[in-house]
Amino acid sequence: MNPNERKFEELMSKMTFDDKPDHRHRDKLEQELLAAFARRQWQQERQSRQAGVWRTIMQNRPMRLVAAAAVIAIVGLVSWKMFERNVTTPITSLELLAKAQAAEKELFTKTGIVHLVSEITVYPTTNKGAELIEKLGETGKSAEEVNKINHEIFSQWMISWLPISSLKANGWPETNRIKLSESAQQAYTIQDESWYDAATGRFARVMETDGNIIFANSYDGSFVYQSESMNNGTIKMKSEAVAANFKAPDNPAEFLGLTAGVQQCLDEKCLRQPVQAVTNDVLADGTKVTVYKTGFIGLTGELNTYYLFKVRQSDEIVAEIDYITNGKPQVTVQRVLSESVEKPEFSWNLAELNNKELAGETPSPVTVASDVAIPNISVRDMAERASFDTHIFATDPNWTQQRMIVDVLDTMSAPKRMFVIIYKAQDKRDVILAQSETHNKYFASISKQIEAAGKTLEKTVYPNGYKVWAHAGPVAWWTDLTLRSSGIEPAANRNGYIVESPSGTILIIAVNGQLTKEELDGLINSLIPAKDYQVK
Amino acid sequence: MMSISELSGFAFEPDTMTQSKSDPGAFTRLYLRHYDAIFRYCAHRLFERTTAEDITSEVFLKMVENFQTFDGNEKQFRNWLYRIATNAVNEHIRKTTRRSAILTWVWRGSSNSDANEAVAADESQHNQAVIKKAILELKPEEQAIVTMRFFENMKAEEIAEVVGTSASTVRSQLSRAIEKLRKHISSTQLDGQEVTI
C-alpha cells in the first residue's frame, strides 16, 4: 500500500454509515427469494430435462413417481428373465403432438376473457390390486398363471386417475386427482370450466357435477384460491396471498383447459414411451381427428394402458383425451367450448364460493384430492407418516451430493403412502431407494411362489441384518423404469437390488452405474431404520 | 463493519452450492450468509439505506434467476454476488437524476451542519459529506473499487475477481481514483482546514 493509499484509508476509516442490516427487510426478501427460487425451478423443469432432473422431481414428476413405484411393485422374480429388455424406443410422432400443445397454448392468447369448457367423464372402477397381490402368494400355480396374475396386477394399477393441475400461492403447481367412490355404479360427468384473462394473468377454474362444485382454483391478482375437499363431499375454499414476485406459469394450459395435467404427454414422452400408433378417426359430431396412442407397455409387451389424444385435423386442437385400460375407458375428457367472453361467470375471487350453496341435492361420489405427491419431506416425516417401518442410509452414499424424499400415494394400497428417496450424484451414479406396503406384500407373495416352486431364494446377509436378494439382474426392467421415472436416463451399467430389512420391509434400490464391492457393501451396511436417523 | 476477510472465514464446503440449487433450506442458509455483506456494500456505495435495500433485493433476485447456471464454490459465489451488486449499483448511479439526488442529499446534510455552526459532531458529518461527495464524483466503476478496497477491506486480487480484471489493473485504477479523490478533497475545507492527502 502506498502512502497515498494509506492516508486515504485512515480518512475512510473515520467514515460512519447507516449500514446495519434490518432483519425485516432480510426476512421479507427471504420470502420473495424462496418464491422466486421455486418459480425458477418450475420454469427450468419445463425448459430442460437435462441435469436439472433432480429438481424436477419436486414439481412435475409425481405422476411418474407413482408410475415407477407401481411398476417396481409388479415386476416379479419369477418373470425376471422376461423383462430383461431395453424399453428405450425411438420417438416417432411426438413432434406432431407438440403442435397440439402449441395450439392449446395459443387458445389462451385471445383478447378478452378466454372461456374454456370441457367435460370429464369418470368411469367406475374397482381396485383389486391388494386382492391380486394376495392371490399371487397362493401356491400351486403354474408359471403361466403367476404371470397372468402379474399382468392383472399391472393393469389394476393402471386403473388410474386424471392428474388435475392447480396453482399454489407460491407459484408452484399442485397435482390433484379425481376420485370416484368405489361404490359408484355408473359413470359421472364433470363439467370443467375455466376463465383466463391474458392481460392480467387472472384465472378461475371450477369443476361441477350434478350440482356439486367439487373443485375450484383461481387467482385474482393478489390471492390464490384453492378448494379443499371436506369429508361430507363438499368443498371449502382456502385463500392465500401470493408471494411478492408470484408469477403464473407462462403457459396457462399447464393448469387450465382440456390438457391441464397431461401436458407432459404432449410435449415429451409419457413415461418415456413413444407414440405407439397414429390413426385417423371421425368424432360423433363429424369432426375429423388424428388419434395419437401413447401409453405404458405391459409386462408381456403389449400396450394395455394408454392415452388416446384425438387432435382436430383442421386446427391441431385437442378435441378429446381418452384414458384406456384393458380396452375400457377410465377417464374421457372432451372439449365442449372455447370462446372469448367479457367477464367470467364466477368472480376471480373464488372465496366467494364459501357463501354459496356448493352441494347439490345428493352428495357427489366424485371428489378431488391433492394427496398425490408431497415432495421434499424430512426423514422424520417419512418415519411418522409411513404405515410400515421405513429405512434410509445413515449417511448419504459418499458419491452422491443431493437427497430428496418424496411421499407418494401408494395407489395399490391407497390411501397408504409410498416413499421414494432419490440421491443425485455428480458422477451420474444416482441412487433411488423406494419402499411401500405394496412392495412388502408383493415381494412376500413372490417369495412364497419361489418357495412353492422348490427353489431357494438366495439372500446375502449383511452385519446389520439387512439381506440382499439374489437375481436382481443388472438390466432388470424395473431398474430402468425406476430410474427413468425419476427423470434419470439409465446408464448401460445400471444395477438394481432388492433388500429385505430385519423388520421385513422390502427396499428397492436402483443405482445408475456400477458399484464396487466396497461401495455396495457400504451402501447396504449403512441402512438403518428411519426412526433412528440422526440429522448431521 | 464486517469485512470480506471475516466473511472469508466461511467453511466453503464443496457441496454447499450444489445442494443450494435444489434444497430451499440450503438455499436460504446460503442467502442468509451473504445478505449482510451485500447490503452493507450497497449501503457503502449509495450512502442511503432504503435504496441500498432495494438494490440488495434486486441483486438477490437476479441471483435466483441465474443461480442454476452458476458453477463455482461459495467463494466464487460471493464474488459473483459482488459483481451483480456492483453492476446494479453502477446502473443505479448512472441514472443522472438519481445521482444528482444523492449528491444533493449528501450536501444537504453538510449544509445543515454548517448552518447550525454546530459542534464537532457536525464537523465530522460535514467531513463525511465532503468525502462522500468526492466519491460520488468518481466514475461508478472507480467508486466500486474504492468502496471494495476501503469499506469492504478487499484485496486487489479479490476486487479483480469481482470486476473481472487483473489485480494490477485494479491497483492502477485505484491509484487513479485516489488521486482524483485527493484533488476533490484538497480543494474542499475539512474541519475548517485545507486538507492534503
Image: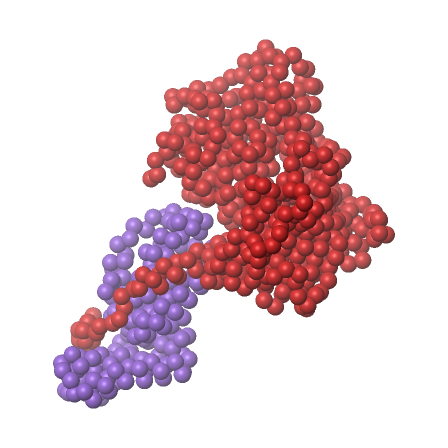
Chain colours: A red, B purple
* Residue B114 picture quarter: bottom left
Can residue A268 be spotted in the picture?
Answer: no
* Residue B180 picture quarter: bottom left
* Residue B153 picture quarter: bottom left
Number of labelled discs?
Answer: 0
Could you tell me which residue is drawn at 30 percent across and 66 percent down? B40
Is residue A160 toward the left or the right of residue B172 in the image? Answer: right
Give how far across and how far down residue A153 sits, in percent.
65, 27
Of residues B19 and A2, which is closer to you in this image? B19
- Up/down of A151 relative to A222, above or below: above
Can residue A477 be spotted in the picture?
Answer: yes
Could you tell me which residue is drawn at 33 percent across and 65 percent down? B39
Is residue B86 toward the left or the right of residue A474 in the image? Answer: left
Give how far across and how far down residue B41 sits, in percent.
31, 68
Give how far across and how far down residue A436 sits, in percent.
52, 30
Quadrant for the C terminus of chain A, please. top left
The residue at the far right in this view is: A286
Quadrant for the N terminus of chain A, please. bottom left
Could you tell me which residue is drawn at 53 percent across and 48 percent down? A59
The residue at the far top in this view is: A454
- Up/down of A472 relative to B193, above or below: above
Is residue A212 toward the left or the right of residue B167 in the image? Answer: right
Could you tell me which residue is drawn at 67 percent across and 33 percent down? A183
- Up/down of A495 relative to A270, above or below: above
Give how far across and how far down residue A115 sits, in percent.
69, 60
Is residue B179 toward the left or the right of residue A237 in the image? Answer: left
